[in-house]
Amino acid sequence: MAFWSKKRAEFEEVDRVIQQQPGVRPAQIARQVGVARSTIQRRLPSMEEAGYLYSEDDKGGLWPFKRWR
């Protein structure tokens, strides 16, 4: 079992914010989910490993990649 599997609920919460507000910045996500900005910054690499893929724009905003089926 991957270490990130225990964080699935937290990852889903962050993903929900990014999906609903494309271009949102980590500090804004942190405020909405009630954690420190550094927590979001630390979670992002683990989220990528877990299959959550985002693109970062020049201003630091996070954008979800579209998943083709």
Image (cartoon, rainbow, N blue to C red):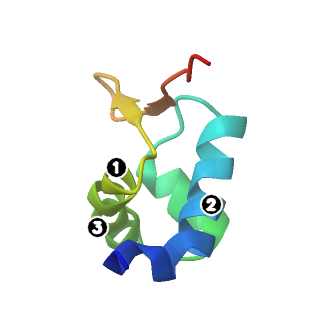
Q: Which mark is residue 42?
A: 3
Q: CA distance from mark 3 to mark 2?
A: 15 Å
| Rendered residue at 58%/65% (across/down) | 31
Query: Label 3 is placed on what type of residue?
Result: Arg
Left or right of 42, for residue 69: right
Query: Label 1 is placed on what type of residue?
Result: Glu
Q: Secondary structure at mark 1?
A: helix
Residue 28 image point, x, y percent? 54, 52
Q: Is residue 56 above or below residue 39?
A: above
Q: CA distance from mark 1 to mark 3?
A: 11 Å
Most foreground residue, 20 or 34: 20
* Residue where numbered disc 2 is placed: 12
Q: CA distance from mark 2 to mark 1?
A: 12 Å
Q: Is residue 15 above or below residue 33?
A: above
Mark 2 or mark 1: whose residue is earlier in sequence = 2
* Residue where numbered disc 1 is placed: 48
* Residue at the far right in the pictured view: 20
Which quadrant would the N terminus be assigned to in this image?
bottom left
Query: Label 2 is placed on what type of residue?
Result: Glu
Left or right of 7, for residue 17: right
| Rendered residue at 68%/50% (across/down) | 16
Callout 1 crowding tier (Cα within 10 Å): few <14, some 14–19, many ≥20? few
Which quadrant would the C terminus be assigned to in this image?
top right
Instruction: State if disc 2 and disc 3 touch (CB < 8 Å).
Output: no
Mark 3 or mark 2: whose residue is earlier in sequence = 2
* Front tag of 1 and 3: 1
Callout 2 crowding tier (Cα within 10 Å): few <14, some 14–19, many ≥20? few
